[in-house]
Amino acid sequence: MLGKLLSQCKSNVHQQYQYLCFYGLHIIPFLGPWPDIQRSKLYKSVLSGLGPLEFSQNFTKTGKTVRMGFEPTTFIASTSRDVCNRHALGEALNRFKQLDIKLDLQVYHQLVNEVSLTDKEEDTLRDREVLDDEPAKSQSLLTLDFNNDDVTVKLYLYPQLKSLATGIPRAQLMFNAVRNVDKTGAFSESMDMIEEYFYSVRATTAPYWMSCDLVEPHKTRFKIYIALFQVHIENAVSMWTLDNRISDCETMTGLAMVRDLWNSFDIRDGLREQKNRPGNPGDPSNIVPILFNLEILPGRTYPQPKIYFPTTGMNDLDVAMVLVKFFERHGLHEHAQSYIDNLASYVPHMDLNDCTDLQAWISFSYSDVTGPYITVYYH
């Protein structure tokens, strides 16, 4: 599948070979044991595709790019020696650094203990015997964007276990972490707006994790990820605009497209009650919350929103047709013409009309520079 994605994104043969070798030699060794639902003691990643691995693809007016998300894992995470899978992340990043991939680890070193467990905190959770109640113990993920000439690395951090150990709410851990990294106040206006918003909304809208680019600290972007459990279009509008705190033309143009996609996917209102576990194939779409992220750029006075529509449990051909029509309406004709054939090529042994788990998430954002920005996450 990765080979097909790279080819369809018009990477040349040399780049395809380079990235496939990179995947085989340096990613697969960090995926841990092959996932098996019968082996209940295996470490379970918060990702719910091929174990700790997820492919995705970005679609914009300028073309397509391939992304890969994974949780660095080893067999040790399935033993008592690293039950919270804390050690593989640093090993993976050091490996990438040795390969001369362009990444800066300053932000990683500043953040990792702010939102992830320390040795003492892990011992605290073990002593309190609360880890068994947390089937997804993931604390970090990495994503790799395969560009024409290089790989861009992003770090994702999940503060749930840190919050349990310290008693500090997840949101506060993340907000404090961003502000502690921000020595010049470049993110302060956006952060003020975000914190003010979350102090005013109910608990069914909750920040869950964060991410950043592994570049020089003054160039990085932070993203705060939010789960919207009380699903209703007006709650989504509130999240997109931070309850009307953001109302510029760019944001409202994007909001009109959010409404369009919401109706096209026929999102049903109601309270989502996803179980405290990674998703499984066959899960219905009505147990998964809507997700958002708020992107915080240095020097920008307000964050840029992105919405994630959960499409696991929906007919994959129907989902694909929604995207094709959306591409057509917004002038992305090349994507519209090729999308369904490309999608079918990833599962040649299956009929898209019989699939409900291939396209797991569809994310959307908008800016005047990029236009509509769609990402499809494949499971």
Image (cartoon, rainbow, N blue to C red):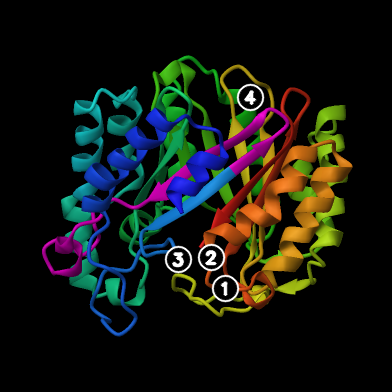
Q: Is residue 2 magenta?
A: no
Residue at which label 2 appears:
347
Q: Secondary structure at mark 2?
A: loop
Residue 81, given in percent of the width and then of the height, sits at 11, 63
Residue type pointed to by label 2: Val
Residue 135, given in percent of the width and then of the height, sits at 35, 73
Quick check: 376 left or right of 230? Answer: left
Q: Quadrant of residue 105?
A: top left
The residue under the point 85% across, 39% down is 330
Q: Is residue 171 visible?
A: no
Q: Is residue 63 visible?
A: yes
Between disc 1 and disc 3, the foreground one is: 1
Residue at which label 4 appears:
189
Residue at which label 1 appears:
350
Magenta part of the chain: 58-86
Residue 27, given in percent of the width and then of the height, sits at 28, 47
User: On residue 48, which mark appears?
Assistant: 3
Q: Secondary structure at mark 3?
A: loop
Mark 2 is surrounded, within 10 Å at the Cα level, by few (under 14), some (14 to 19) or many (20 or more) other residues, namely: few
Q: Is residue 68 magenta?
A: yes
Quick check: 296 left or right of 125? Answer: right
Foreground of the two, 257 or 132: 257
